[in-house]
Each structure stands twice: as structure tokens, then as C-alpha cells.
Image (cartoon, helix red, strand yellow):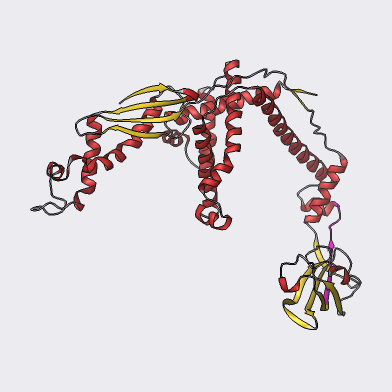
Amino acid sequence: MSIAVEKKEHNMAVITVEVPAEDFERSIERAYQKNKKRISIPGFRKGKAPKKLIEKMYGPEIFYEDAVDDCLGEAWNKAVDECEEEIVSSPKIDITQVEEGKPLIFTAEVALNPEAEIGNYKGIEIEKIDTEVTDDEVNEQIDKERDEQSRMVTVEREAKNGDQTIIDYEGFVDDKAFDGGKAENYPLTLGSGSFIPGFEEQIEGHKAGDEFDVNVTFPEEYHAEHLKGKAAVFKCKLHEVKEKEVPALDEDFADDAGFDSVDEYKEDVKKKLAEKKEAEAKDKKETAVLDKLIEEAKMDIPDAMVETAARNSLDQFSRQLMMQGMSLKQYYEYTGLNDSLMIEQSKPQALRRIQSRLVMEAVAKAEGMEASEEEYDKEIEEMASSYGMKPEDVKEMFRAQDKRSIMKDIIIKKALDFVIENAVEK
């Protein structure tokens, strides 16, 4: 197979691929085997007519479409592997020669990876990020964890804001009950704002067993048209009052959390908060240095490159939905979106990822960064571990193009770490 690359403006190119005649002939034969049982020739049972006779009666092009489909994917993948240029978009294919006994020739219009011209990448000034963990932050996190371990307990007192109550209620407008205005043993947390304004406040001060009226006015913007702005009376009965019981910060709480003492528990909370702050700080630094580099860089990014990146994001999103038990079609039914809208929405993020990658490639090139076989093997081992596979089996799945992509990812990570480490915090 031979390929020829013709570069165009804006980092586009037309790649001409010539598939040897014998390879295309094998695809024609497979197309014949696939379709022969559906073709009727007088004097022959279905599936028994010779290929040459079928071609004579219906024309040799009868098998061309299936034959092209048969060999096109493999031929293009091979062309991508052999091409010295980095192709960064899906191909726009045009068949230019298809004839039995001759090579199959097709062209593919594609985007090529652009190079970014960058400014200064060492000593980029960024805002200093405080990663110190204060005692107040530790106490706040501990209070949050204690609150998560809290439970609701029944109390024999008047209800107050923050309590959970169990009530029966029935609503009346002009002394007539209305649909949807009745419930029994309804759990209502006072202060939650889940009921009509003024309702929850009127439950405060009552005890379990009390029966009372709650007088409210429905808001003008209420969803039910027939109740908008109407005065209503709710006949209520309070069955139970519960309050939140938060566990004390003591040795028992520390033990339940897996620590020998409260001090050890506090140290662990502080350590985790520090790790979280450090990770957040690194993300902010990364964003800041990339913003500066992208702002000063010159890049001619083809639209086809952004389109392909956005489509890849949609494919990834579709796979994530499937893992959650939902299809992309179902998601569209719920949201009113479609492929075109999703792709358009993804383009700004896709462009940002491309810009970030290109400036990091430029940094790596300027610094002469490379990825070693040992680093590649380590990456494969991590992939294999996450997939529950053997490293050699993962390698077997990858084409040359896949390895190049992984090696480039390693280099880009090195470049990003480099610019972050060399940034100056002000």
C-alpha cells in the first residue's frame, strides 16, 4: 500500500491512499461470498452462481460497495500508522478509483496536528495559593463528619426550628378541601422551606398530640393555577417531634472512626484537608500557567480538529451513560438535546483541551523532553491493572498509533509538571 500527503492551508491535508489490486480483489471475493445467496441467476440455485457470471449479468460494480466497505477501514488504519504526519481529525473520504483488477484509490481530507508558537514558559507569575490548614477548618470538617453520624431522636417538648415533625394535614380554601392538600404521617423538617411560606413557623411551639389550624396564603407564583394567591387553612395534627442528636467528640467517636484517640483523629482530618488543599492548589496553578501560555501563544487550529475532539467527548459521555444503565437516546428524550447540540456545547471545552495540549507540546519540544520505554511500560502496567489484564495483552491490543499517543501523553505530563514547578508565586 502506498500513501501520499498533500498539505493544505490551516494545517489541513489530503492523503491519497492506494490499496494494491490483489488486496482489493480479496475484498471483492469476500463481498461475493457475503451476497451470493441473495442473487438469483436463471439455471443456478441461490448461492451457486459463479462470481464472473454474476458480474457479467449485473456489472462488475455489483460487489464494489461492499468490497470498499470491507477494505477501507483496515486500509485507513494502516495508512495512519504508516503516515509520518500526526492526524488529528476523522477523515473525509472520497473514492477516486474503484475497478476490478486495479488498485483501490481513495483520498482522505484530514487535519494535521498544528505547532504552537509560545512565549516565555519559565518563571510564569501566578497568584500565591495558601494551602495552610487552620484549626477552624479542622473543627468545621469534624463538625461536618459528626453531623453525618447524627440521628433523629424523639423528644417530649414543643417543636422548634430544625426539628423533624410527623404531621397529618388537610388544606381548605373557602371551607372546601382541595386536591393534593392532604397527607398523613408526613415527615416535615421545620425551617426546610419545603412548604408554603408561613406554614412551618406555625408548627413551632406545638407538642405531640396537639391539633391546630395553620393559616397561610398561597404565593401568586404558585404552580397550581386555582390556588394562586388564595388564603388557605390547614387542619393539622402533630404526632411526633424529633431533634438531631449529634455524637460528642470523644474517644468513642474516634474509635468508631478507626483511631486510638481524639488527637489522632484530628491529625488525620488535618492531613486529609492538607492533601485536598494541595491538590486544589495544583489544579489552580495548572489553570493559571495554561491561561498565560495560551494567551501568548499563536496557534492555527483546524475546525476539523475541534469537531473531532468534540465528537470524541460525546462518544465518551455515551459510554459513561451506558455504564449507568442509560442510553444516549434516553438522555436526549429527557433533556431535549441531540448530537448536534451536544457537539456544539462541547466545542469550547474541546478547543481549550487542544490549546493546552499544543502549548505543552511546544514546551516539551523546547526542553527536548522524551518518553522512555520504561515509562511506557509503567503506563501499560497501570492500564493493565485497572482493566484486570496482563500488560502483554494490553500491548497486543495497541497499534503503533496508540503507542505514539501514550508516549506523547507522558511527555505532556512532564512538560506540565515542568512549567508548574518553574512558576513564580506572587
- From what the image shows, is residue 309 above or below residue 183? above
Q: Position of residue 38 (x, y in %)?
A: 21, 53
Q: Is residue 73 visible?
A: yes
The percent coordinates of residue 425 (x first, y second) are 78, 24
In which image quadrant can residue 424 be found?
A: top right
Residue 103 in the figure: left or right of residue 156: left
Q: Nearer the viewer, residue 49 or 368?
A: 49
Left or right: residue 24 compared with residue 56:
right
Q: Residue furthest left?
A: 43
Magenta region, main secondary structure? strand
**Residue 325 visible in this rendered orientation of the protein:** no
Between 218 and 414, the residue placed more toward the observer is 218
In the image, is residue 78 above or below residue 144? above
The quadrant the C terminus occupies is top right
Q: Residue at x 58, y 22 (%)?
A: 116
Q: Tag count in the figure?
A: 0
Q: Which residues are magenta?
A: 238-250
Residue 246 part of the magenta-drawn span: yes
